[in-house]
Structures are given as C-alpha cells and as structure tokens.
Image (cartoon, rainbow, N blue to C red):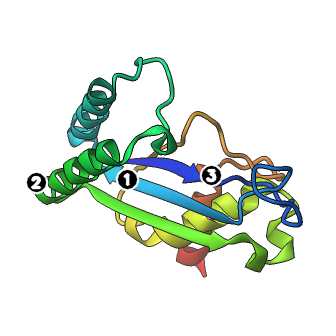
Amino acid sequence: MFAYLDESGDLGWTLDAPFRHGGSSRFLTIGIMTVPKDRAHVPKRLVKNLYRHTGCPAGQELKAAHLNAAQREWFANKIATLCEREQTVKLMSITVRKENVQWHLRDDPNKLYNFMIRLSLLEHISAFPAVEFVPDKRTIKVASGNSLADYLQIYLWSLLSG
C-alpha cells in the first residue's frame, strides 16, 4: 500500500500577522491518497495527464493555487471518476485551525503534521502489512528523530501491546 501525502498551508506559528505578509497560514490541511501497490500506476497516469492538460513542465511542481477554475474542475472530475472506478483507491483529508492547536504540538512543526496523519490515517492503514509513505518532496521528522513511519509504527505497537 502506498500513502501519498500533501499539505496545504504551512507549519509556521506567526498568527499575529496577516497571512503571506509576515504571518503563517491560519489552517493546515493534509490530503492523503492510499493506493494498493499493484494499482500505483493509476494515479500516476492521472497526474501525468494533469501536467499535459495544464501545459506545466514535468520537472516543475504544480500547485492547485496556480490552476484556473476550469483546470481545477477538470482534475476534480478525473479524481472522482478514478475513485469510482478504482474502489481500492481512498482519499482522506484532515484540516486544523491552527489557533486552536495545543501548545505542546507547536514546539516542533512536524509534531502537528505527524499527529494529524495519525488521526486521519492510522485506522485505515492498520489493516495492511506494509505501507510506504510518499510525502510531498520532504522527509517529515519530529524532534525525537523518528520519521512519520516510525512514529505511526510505534503508536500501533503501543495499541497492540496495551
């Protein structure tokens, strides 16, 4: 099983200044797509088609904010069709309003990220013997040095042994 992860918003905590003018985003959303390994080519093909449809060069990161309304609608329709056709492909998301995040999750920016992944994804992936995380172009680490996969595995083990 592959779990593709992407976030919208940032992991900053400057909430007393306007967003993009010295301030951080007020919300953080993490989108997740899980795909069985034998079907991994399906969403990759869709992303390739999106790049072709928008004319974006393949080596450049394509952000939804840079798409026009018609392109976003085209992609949303393609995703909906994919999920209808491929019942094993799952989409999930989680959003937090950052001003409501507890202080202990703010001292290392990735603690919140990992916590959100655990809340949104753990129950779904616990049924699979192996999950490969594919975060968006960065490795998520918490201050303890554990990666996202390690963090989730430790949490699962504690549930099983508890």
Q: Secondary structure at mark 3?
A: helix
Name the disc covering residue 148, or none: 3
Give the position of the C terminus as an image quadrant.
bottom right
Decide which of tag 3 and tag 2 comes sooner along the chain: 2
Q: Quadrant of residue 19?
A: bottom right
Q: Quadrant of residue 132?
A: top left
Q: In this figure, which residue is indicated by the disc labeled 2? A: 85
Left or right relative to 96: residue 100: right
Q: Give the residue at the far left of this rendering.
A: 85
Residue at 51% x, 45% y is 65
Q: Secondary structure at mark 1?
A: strand
Left or right relative to 32: residue 152: right
Q: In this figure, which residue is indicated by the disc labeled 1? A: 33
Left or right relative to 46: residue 14: right
Q: Residue 99, image x and y in percent?
A: 77, 75
Examine the rendering and report whether any part of residue 156 can be seen: no
Residue at 57% x, 67% y is 118
